[in-house]
Image: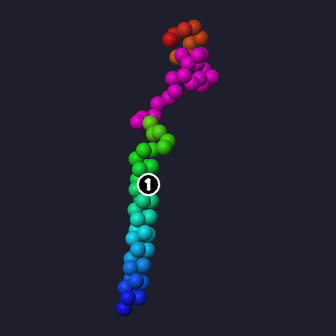
């Protein structure tokens, strides 16, 4: 009878360890998703300092200072 109780206790400890590991993995995934290691912009916009070949020094497109 004691051997059976010991085996049940051992299995219960194993089940608890597995449940704890899964809970920790779920918690870590939740925290990573909330902290967002890569920033997400609130809205998309063009970079005002980027040039596309037609603008000069990031201005409005005129070669003589429209900024």
Q: Secondary structure at mark 1?
A: helix
Dominant secondary-structure state across the stretch colored magenta: loop
The quadrant in which residue 14 appears is bottom left
**Residue at the extreme front:** 2
Residue 6 location, x and y as percent?
40, 83
Q: Height in image: 60 above or below 29?
A: above
- The residue at 54%/16% (across/down) is 59
The quadrant in which residue 53 appears is top right
The magenta stretch is 42-59
Decide whether residue 57 is among the magenta residues.
Answer: yes
- The residue at 41%/53% (across/down) is 30
Q: Height in image: 35 above or below 54?
A: below
Residue 16 location, x and y as percent?
39, 71
At label 1, counting other C-alpha atoms closer than 10 Å, the crowd grade (few under 14, some 14-19, many 20 or more) is few
- The residue at 51%/23% (across/down) is 48
The quadrant in which residue 42 appears is top left
Q: Closer to the camera, 8 or 43?
A: 8
For the N terminus, the quadrant is: bottom left
Q: Is residue 39 left or right of residue 57?
A: left
Query: Which residue is label 1 attached to?
Result: 28
Decide whether residue 64 is among the magenta residues.
Answer: no
Q: Height in image: 63 above or below 40?
A: above
């Amino acid at each position: 009878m004691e051997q059976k109780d010991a085996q049940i206790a051992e299995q219960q400890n194993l089940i608890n360890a597995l449940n704890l590991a899964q809970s920790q993995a779920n918690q870590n995934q939740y925290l990573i998703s909330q902290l967002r290691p890569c920033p997400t912009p609130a809205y998309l916009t063009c970079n005002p300092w980027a040039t596309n070949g037609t603008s000069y020094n990031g201005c409005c497109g005129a070669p003589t200072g429209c900024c």
